[in-house]
Amino acid sequence: MNNKITDFACTIALDAMGGDYAPRNEVIAAAQTFSENPSIKILLIGKESAILDVLKKENLSFPKENIVNAEEVIGMDEIPTVAIRTKKNSSIVVGATMVKNKQADAFVSAANTGAVMTASTLILGRIKGVERPTIGADFPTAYGRVCSIYDVGASVDSKPAHLFGYAVLGSIYAKEVNKTPNPKIGLLSVGEEDNKGNELVFNTRKLLQESTLNYIGNVEGKDILMAKVDIVICDGFVGNVIIKLGESFLTFLKQVLKNYAAKGFTNKLKALIVKNVLKVALKDVDYQTHGGVPLLGVNGITIIGHGSSSPLAIKNMIYKAKEMHDLNLIQKFEEELSKYGKR
């Protein structure tokens, strides 16, 4: 296989064995991207025989030379550190290694989140100045723009220096990707007043106040969807609870409408009207539109997707990875972090 990546605008290593519907959805996404945008080179990593079976069954065109055989698969229930160490020929390890060796510009996977994060951290290493990588999630707000939360599960326990690092990385990402010139940063707490919070909040606040970041103070959970700030900083335990609650919102609405419609024909007609309105109004909430989330802080581009990612979601993960590459975000992270000493 040609190891050079300079012949294409971007080369993406795509984990074909990650996700609940692998390799079907990944192969379809790769073939569609190959057809739509030939400037992106997709390297499909996984069991070659399984990938070829999908291509044949779905009658898809994809260059065989862009298939990278990796016979091992890391399951959703495996312990990440053990799996990474023992399954060197897994699609996750091979994909991260290709980015490390400059055979690819980015790694995209909808596999075991912990395994993808562990492999990326251990194989790619951290950007200088980053103590812990972070995963963020963009929430839609009542005013059309997004509010990004860091961290949403990369680490469940955090120190003030970790949260400060999340703020720096999130601020750069908001400026470059979300096109927010001077993103406002809030620290999630149990009240807006400076005397509210725990020890982690108090000590993190000091670091944020002493920085050049646009830190505005404490925010509460109710402020996230009301766009009070552009970025909310919290530890991964709290952030993961928030994102899981958010993911259940559409399912909750659908069930409420279903229950209402079941009470009679008139209710069914009303529910149908509301359902169609909500479908249009809440289209930006659909994770498939946004693809996956970036793992910020590692020395390379990694996009992690939901296990149930559809071909559309995976395609959008690929395009998000290309956007990060085109914006040269890794270098920008390094430059910004160099302004701050060890904290």
Image (cartoon, rainbow, N blue to C red):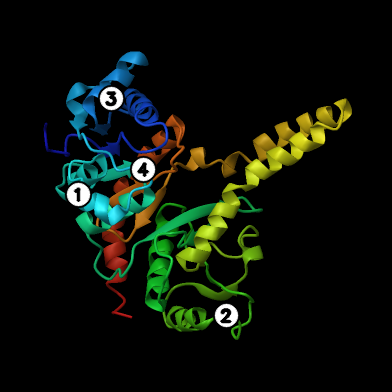
For marks 2 and 4 on the same chain, the one whose residue lies earlier in the sequence: 4
Residue 74 is situated, as x and y percent measured from the top left of the image, at 29, 43
Q: Amino acid at mark 2?
A: Gly
For the residue pair 30 and 267, the one nearer the viewer reads as 267
Tell me the SS state at disc 2. Answer: loop
Q: Are marks 4 and 3 in contact (CB under 8 Å)?
A: no
Horizontal relation, residue 189 to residue 23: left or right: right
Foreground tag (3 vs 1): 1
- The span from disc 2 to disc 4 (Cα, nearest Å) is 35 Å
Query: What kind of residue is marked 4?
Result: Ala
Does residue 218 lie above or below 66 as drawn?
Answer: below
Q: Which numbered tag is attached to residue 51?
A: 3
- Quarter of the image where the C terminus is located: bottom left
Closer to the camera in the image, 117 or 320: 117
- First-in-chain label (4 vs 3): 3
Amino acid type shown at disc 1: Thr
